[in-house]
Every structure is written in structure tokens, then in C-alpha cells.
Amino acid sequence: MADPNSPIFKKAPWLTKAMDVLDTLIDSDRNTVWADKVLLPNQTRAKTMTVTQSAFTNSLETILRPKLGPLANEDSYKICDIVDIIDDYWNAIKENCPTPFEPRSEDHTPNDYALQQTIGVSSLHLLLTMLLNDFKGVLARDRETRTRQFTELLAVDGIYNVDHWDRTVEMEEGVKGGKWTMMGTNQKTFKVVSDKLYNEIRKTEAYKDLIEKTKGS
């Protein structure tokens, strides 16, 4: 029998949910921005794929962790609700920074951009955790309205400036890679990036307006 105090056992509840969320997100019938982008175990990596299943599901821990994650309460958030929120969030990211999401072609390679790779996914899901914690009760349940709220919140340079995510852009002294691509792929980096983005967002009118609404909710 598994030890209920072991790290793997404690991880299992949110990880199982994260797997279900991802499986729904990448379902071809949903046609999300993650279709054909996630490398599953035992799959051969296609040129369209930008992130592994494990990297994506691990990035959802802060959102789904029991008692602490803003979407962890199963009475309030079913799998379909969680998927819709994450889908709306990524649609808002795409609205602000569309280039990385363009289909692969002779002139465009999705893996040239860190936005849908481990650093982007992990940092942006940490950011989503912070935003969901800030806006409990005021983010719309209507998907169109919620997507618009996310789009307005995410309209900051750190997200919409595609050069920050571009691995091929030439910077000073011939060095290639935008600022988010040069920072590594560890938890400390993800926290640094998400904090920088969060601090940008907190200065926006969209953020301030929603915070005011929380005071009356």
C-alpha cells in the first residue's frame, strides 16, 4: 500500500485532476490553442509540439493544489469549469500576443517562441494563480466576458511584446533571445517571471477596477 505521507501520494489528487484538465484541453473537438502542441508519453515529437505533458501538468499545481489552489474546490469547480477558465485565459494571451500561436509553416516555427514552452506555461500559470486569488467572486462566469476581462488584464508589455518570448530575436552584441528566453527553466525562474508580469498588471486600470469590485463582493 502506498504511504499516504509520501510526496507522490500527496501529489496524486491534484496531478490526476491536472491530467484530466490537459486531456480535455487538447481534445481536437475543442480546438483550443493547445491542440497538437503537447507531447504525450510514448509519442514521437511533432514539429508543432512545444511542451511536454509533464511540464504542463506540473505547471497546474498552484492552481489545483488541495485547500490552497484557487480552483481546487470540487464543489465549485468541476473539470469542465477549470478547462474553460484556463482556455479563456490562454485565448486572452493569444489575443495580446498572437504571433507565437500562428500555425507552423515555412516562415513560422512555434518552438522559436518560449510562450507555449515550459517557461511560458509555468510562469503564466503561476500568474493565473495570483490573478484568481485576487479576483475571487468578480471574474465573470460568462466565458465571453471573462475572456475580455483576462484580455484587458494581460495587455502589458511583458506579455504582448513578442520579442520577449522570441528565441531568435537578436539582442545586444549579437546575442539571440528575448528576455524571458534567457532565464532558465526552474521554479525560481518561473516565480521571477510571473512576479514581474504581475507587478506590471497591478499598475493597469483593468486590475484596479476589478480590485475595487472585490471590495463590494
Image (cartoon, grey):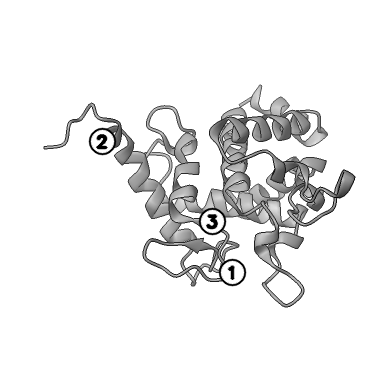
Mark carried by residue 48? 1
Location of the C terminus by quadrant is top right
Front one among 17 and 47? 47
Q: Which x, y percent locates residue 185?
A: 58, 41
Amino acid of disc 1 = Thr
Front one among 141 and 27? 27
Mark sitting earlier along the chain (2/1) = 2
Per the model, the C-alpha gap separating discs 2 and 3 is: 25 Å
Furthest residue toward front? 173
Q: Which x, y percent locates residue 43?
A: 41, 68
- Pointer 3: what residue? 51
Q: Secondary structure at mark 3?
A: strand
Q: Secondary structure at mark 1?
A: loop
> Could you tell me how many numbered marks the image carries?
3
- Between circles 2 and 1, the one closer to the viewer is 1
User: Mark 1 and 3 residues: CB-CB less than 8 Å, in contact?
Assistant: no
Mark carried by residue 142? none
Location of the N terminus by quadrant is top left
Furthest residue toward left? 1
Per the model, the C-alpha gap separating discs 2 and 1 is: 33 Å
Q: Is residue 165 visible?
A: yes
Q: Which x, y percent locates residue 79?
A: 41, 50
Q: Is residue 131 visible?
A: no
Amino acid of disc 3 = Val
- Pointer 2: what residue? 9
Residue at x-position 46% and y-position 32%: 69
Quadrant assignment, res 182: top right
Amino acid of disc 2 = Phe
Quadrant assignment, res 213: top right
Q: Which x, y percent locates residue 105?
A: 70, 76
